[in-house]
Image (cartoon, rainbow, N blue to C red):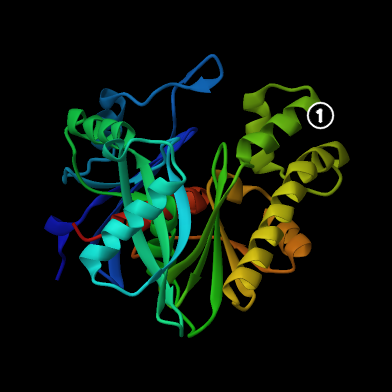
Amino acid sequence: MLFSSKSLIGIDIGSYSIKIAAFNGRPGAYALKAAACFKLPSEGGQAAPMEPGFLSGIIKSQKISGRTASASFTGHSLIFKHLHLPQMPEKDLKEAVKWEVRKEIAIDPKDLISDYVLSGSGKDKTLSIIAFAAVRNEVEGQMRLFKEAGLELKVLEAVPTALLSAFDLNNGWEAGVNYGMLDIGDGRSTLAVLKDKRLSFVREISIGGRDLTRSLAQALNISYEEAEERKIQNGLKEGDKAAVKALSAPLERLCTEIHRSFDYYHAQFREGSVTKLFLSGGTARMVGIEGFITNLTGIQSYADDPLRKIKIPKGMDRQALGRIAPCLSIAAGLATRVP
């Protein structure tokens, strides 16, 4: 039985592109309705603000009948905070999380929206929590965008929880095993550790695909657009020493931050090592990136394919979908959310 009336359109709006995924079906038996990745319009080399008409046009171009959506929130004000709190009723816990988040943010309480997920519980009867917070007007602005585009926004969530849903979509869970997901965005990367179907650790790293593209453009004296295309298609191919050197420098910094993050997770939370690292985002399509990160971190790394276990209808271009698959991880995770 297909539950198409309850399906959501997963929409991931980044600073470089917009990604869309929509499914029919139920967990374990999803079929693809639509999947696409579009570069955002630019002004002076920078992505232009998303306009309702552009968003609505993209949805129409995919011939998606539904109008209910789930989206990622990636506003500049979004923060993550790890908390350890005593066990208490849910109502009291919500207030406690708000109080703890506001301690370190110089924002009026009425201007802040916060939420949280439980990441575990300790033997000392404490709760391990990952809290999310953002400025209210940014959240409301994104909700207005979808409303003006003719979409009903049912779910708005942070990238880490969407990555958790994306992992769960196609992977089995081994008890007690730590998995990593690294979404390499345009301006920054989001690193998440997943364990026992929960989000265990989150960190934002201020290195993204833009850093690699700029480094390549400067080293080879080519345009940003040409460097972006060359980064994905040629990547770290042997024989192109100048390109490899240019791309290696920011990638090495990224790997250093990954190492530091996992070392902190191991020491602070007394957890074991991360066994596998899945890469998502446009830069995850770059030739050679999996081996490079594996070699520098010592953790087996894979470009994520969120459509790996999704039924692809006849008539859809499987090769084209394969080329953009790592870009779709967040959108695919969002599409599995229950409204």
Choose top left, top right, bottom left or bottom right for residue 266.
bottom right
Q: Position of residue 77 (x, y in %)?
A: 43, 37
294 displayed left or right of 108: right
Q: Residue furthest top?
A: 44
Q: Position of residue 39 (x, y in %)?
A: 46, 31
Where, quadrant-wise, is the C terminus in this rendering?
A: bottom left
**Relative to 206, does residue 118 appear above or below in the rendering?**
below
Q: Residue 300 or 250: which is nearer the viewer?
A: 250
Instruction: Please report the residue visible at 23 percent of the width from the left and 40 percent of the height from the top.
Output: 63
Instruction: Please report the residue visible at 61 percent of the width from the left and 69 percent of the height from the top.
Output: 268
> Secondary structure under badge 1?
helix
191 displayed left or right of 165: right
How many C-alpha atoms fall within 10 Å of the one at disc 1: few (<14), some, or many (≥20)?
some
Residue type, mark 1 in image: Ala
**Relative to 235, does residue 178 appear above or below in the rendering?**
below
Instruction: Please report the residue visible at 47 percent of the width from the left and 54 percent of the height from the top.
Output: 81
User: From where the camera sits, is residue 32 visible?
Assistant: no
Q: Residue 322 or 4: which is nearer the viewer?
A: 4
**Relative to 208, does residue 259 appear above or below in the rendering?**
below
Q: Residue 109 or 14: which is nearer the viewer?
A: 109
Q: Residue 109 or 137: which is nearer the viewer?
A: 109
Q: Position of residue 18 (x, y in %)?
A: 40, 37
Residue occupied by mark 1: 219
Q: Position of residue 323 (x, y in %)?
A: 52, 49
User: From where the camera sits, is residue 203 visible?
Assistant: yes
**Relative to 195, does residue 112 appear above or below in the rendering?**
above
170 displayed left or right of 206: left
Where, quadrant-wise, is the N terminus in this rendering?
A: bottom left
Q: Residue furthest left?
A: 5
Instruction: Please report the residue visible at 33 percent of the width from the left and 35 percent of the height from the top.
Output: 108
